[in-house]
Image (cartoon, coloured by chain):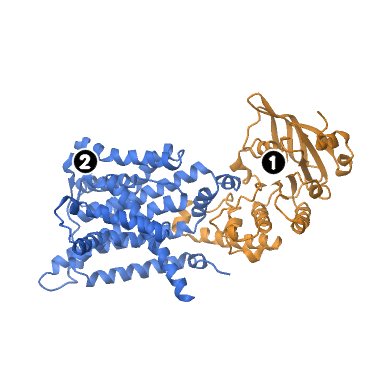
Chain colours: A orange, B blue
């Protein structure tokens, strides 16, 4: 989907989440615009993952809302995301262990219309044609990420860094207008990190990206904008340059703001 | 790139394979004795049910101890329908039983698919227990504990005319039901082969492997689990219908927990989640009495003693344990293991 520059793909508005008396998020707001790469950062326990789960609809906020302005929709349930062209990768890799890499990527297009159960059972041309097209597309996404050589392997047999790319290839199958990456850097070594950063920058040319991360070295050169959370609140937002000199942020990361 | 066979070939391959294998099986029935024909018929009917169970357990990861109950639905549907419409072609009996099996699966799935593991097993177990008493109590519909009887599935004259000799009619009347069962099974296996390779089949495996990730790629968990149940129950209904047609009767005691467990055992012995595993499971069912009598002979157990009478349960129990220990993927898995061993 081609969107005008500056058009918003995600708008989190005054979201609050509390578990009993504990506020995980209070009055959190931030935006992501078309073709923008935004990093959501903060110390452990700052509420990053909670914020991500709210965006994905795994958690319902007690107040506030999550809108996808370019779609004119809000507060989607997890299984509706893919239909709407929003993809999320999971912390760890979240691949299907007993499916091959290629099948894993094909699964990314599970939400696409075409071929109900009856068509499938009868094996009608429409169903098998769809599957063939899907296979070709999955393969091309694996190629785009440079991991097509692993198409026939099982997730358990491939290196972690490769598995992460497979997860991204799967996310690309929904041709996302918004890509949500949950800790893309975790578990990767130096070389893999560098390569993965390049992948994300490249993805940013076709989609907006929101990523949760605590590896600052990885995030800083990568993103256009940062949103910093601490104790469930947005304490700063701005370009990496601005954030790296922000007193509040430095204090939060050094743990002296109490 | 290594891909599994059925991925490489489209529907037309599966169609040709089904027709060829069906034709081969039909050819075999011509040389079998009437006794073996009727054993094979039962095995073909049972393999349909095993396949449906394999789809549910192997592909969607949900356990059912209630598939004998769905068989009962199909078995009674066929008996009741056949008694009210004596001239109706059997395809209507088969169709109605499949549909009603599926509908009963839907009814049970609504609560069942919200449950997991032992809770789900417990609920389907309760269904298994409920079927026989329900059938016995609804006397006006089901004939109570005596069950129902229908006309035997006798060979039509064009088929009987294929045979000559003194016991031509005996042979024809034994082989005809077997051939019908084989054709029905071939159709059921063809549809399932397609389902295995369809988007629906993949959805089941996604839900089985990783619920969170499945939801994120757009799979509706509840709907997918329910669908798995409905199709599994429909296959059980079809198999139950075939059993009534083959035996000419249905009794409530047939479709209890014991049969549900036997189905599980046969599925594991053959190989979970595969087409050939279901065929092997069906064949083992056909010849289970032979297996037991061999054990009888070897061990010298008196078949009329209490121990001898329960030998079948013991033999299958031991086989099940051995399979789980030595070949967890069943005889199918053992086969491919041996092939790899030879190739080395």
Q: Quadrant of residue A242?
A: top right
Q: Residue at x 31, y 44 (%)?
A: B69
Task: Provide the chain ID for the residue under circle 2.
Answer: B
Residue B255 showing in the rendered view: yes
Q: Establish if B339 lies above or below B246.
A: below
Label 1, secondary structure: give it: loop
Towards the viewer: B294 or B28 = B294
Spot occupied by residue A69 in the image (x, y as percentages of width and height): 73, 38
Residue placed furthest toward the top: A21
Label 2, secondary structure: give it: helix
Q: Quadrant of residue A15?
A: top right
Quarter of the picture holding the C terminus of chain A:
top right
Residue placed furthest toward the bottom: B343
Spot occupied by residue A107 in the image (x, y as percentages of width and height): 58, 54
Q: Horizontally, is B296 left or right of A79 in the view?
A: left
Task: Provide the chain ID for the residue under circle 1.
Answer: A
Picture disc at residue A71 = 1
Please identify, in this view, whether the residue under mark 1 or under mark 2 is nearer the observer. 2
Residue B175 showing in the rendered view: no
Q: Horizontally, is A210 left or right of B125 in the view?
A: right
Picture disc at residue B315 = none
Neighbourhood count class around disc 1 (C-alpha, 10 Å): few under 14, some 14–19, many 20 upward: few
Spot occupied by residue A155 in the image (x, y as percentages of width and height): 59, 58
From the image, tell me which residue sits under label 2: B142
Q: How many marks?
A: 2
Q: Residue at x 71, y 49 (%)?
A: A186
Q: Establish if A203 lies above or below B339.
A: above
Neighbourhood count class around disc 2 (C-alpha, 10 Å): few under 14, some 14–19, many 20 upward: many
Q: Horizontally, is B216 left or right of B305 in the view?
A: right
């Amino acid at each position: 989907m081609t969107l005008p520059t500056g058009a918003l793909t995600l708008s989190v508005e005054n979201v609050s989440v509390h578990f009993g008396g504990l506020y995980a998020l209070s009055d959190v707001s931030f935006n992501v615009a078309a073709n923008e790469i935004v990093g959501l950062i903060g110390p452990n326990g700052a509420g990053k993952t909670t914020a991500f789960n709210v965006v994905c609809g795994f958690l319902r906020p007690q107040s506030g809302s999550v809108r996808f302005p370019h779609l004119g929709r809000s507060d989607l349930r997890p299984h509706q995301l893919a239909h709407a062209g929003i993809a999320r990768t999971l912390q760890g890799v979240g691949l299907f262990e007993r499916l091959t890499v290629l099948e894993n990527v094909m699964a990314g297009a599970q939400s696409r219309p075409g071929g109900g159960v009856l068509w499938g059972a009868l094996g009608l041309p429409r169903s098998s044609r769809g599957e063939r097209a899907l296979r070709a597309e999955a393969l091309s996404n694996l190629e785009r990420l440079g991991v097509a050589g692993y198409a026939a392997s099982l997730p358990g047999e491939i290196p972690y860094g490769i598995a992460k790319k497979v997860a991204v290839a799967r996310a690309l199958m929904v041709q996302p207008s918004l890509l949500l990456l949950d800790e893309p850097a975790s578990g990767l070594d130096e070389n893999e990190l560098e390569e993965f950063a390049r992948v994300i920058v490249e993805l940013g040319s076709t989609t907006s990206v929101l990523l949760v991360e605590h590896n600052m070295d990885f995030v800083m050169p990568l993103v256009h904008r940062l949103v910093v959370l601490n104790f469930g609140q947005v304490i700063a937002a701005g370009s990496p340059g601005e954030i790296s000199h922000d007193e509040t942020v430095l204090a939060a990361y050094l743990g002296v703001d109490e | 790139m290594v891909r599994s066979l059925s991925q490489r070939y489209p529907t037309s391959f599966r169609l040709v394979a089904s027709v060829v294998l069906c034709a081969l099986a039909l050819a075999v029935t011509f040389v079998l004795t009437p006794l073996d024909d009727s054993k094979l018929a039962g095995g073909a009917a049972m393999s349909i049910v095993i396949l449906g169970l394999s789809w549910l357990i192997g592909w969607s990861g949900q356990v059912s101890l209630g598939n004998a109950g769905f068989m009962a639905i199909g078995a009674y549907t066929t008996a009741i329908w056949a008694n009210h419409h004596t001239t109706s072609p059997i395809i209507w009996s088969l169709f109605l039983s499949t549909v009603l099996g599926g509908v009963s699966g839907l009814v049970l799935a609504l609560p069942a698919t919200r449950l997991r593991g032992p809770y789900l097993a417990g609920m389907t177990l309760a269904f298994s227990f409920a079927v026989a008493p329900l059938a016995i109590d609804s006397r006006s519909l089901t004939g109570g504990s005596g069950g129902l009887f229908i006309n035997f599935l006798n060979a039509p004259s064009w088929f009987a005319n294929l045979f000559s000799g003194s016991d031509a009619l005996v042979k024809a009347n034994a082989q005809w039901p077997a051939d019908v069962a084989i054709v029905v099974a071939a159709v059921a296996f063809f549809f399932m082969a397609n389902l295995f390779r369809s988007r629906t089949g993949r959805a089941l495996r996604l839900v089985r492997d990783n619920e969170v990730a499945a939801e994120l790629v757009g799979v509706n968990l509840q709907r997918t689990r329910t669908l798995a149940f409905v199709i599994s129950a429909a296959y059980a209904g079809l198999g139950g219908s075939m059993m009534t047609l083959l035996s000419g009767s249905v009794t409530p005691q047939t479709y209890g927990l014991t049969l549900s467990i036997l189905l599980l055992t046969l599925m594991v012995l053959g190989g979970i989640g595969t087409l050939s595993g279901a065929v092997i499971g069906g064949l083992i069912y056909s010849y289970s009495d032979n297996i037991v009598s061999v054990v009888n002979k070897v061990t010298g157990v008196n078949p009329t003693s209490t121990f001898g009478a329960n030998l079948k349960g013991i033999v299958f129990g031991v086989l099940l344990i051995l399979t789980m220990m030595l070949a967890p993927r069943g005889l199918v898995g053992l086969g491919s293991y041996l092939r790899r061993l030879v190739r080395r």
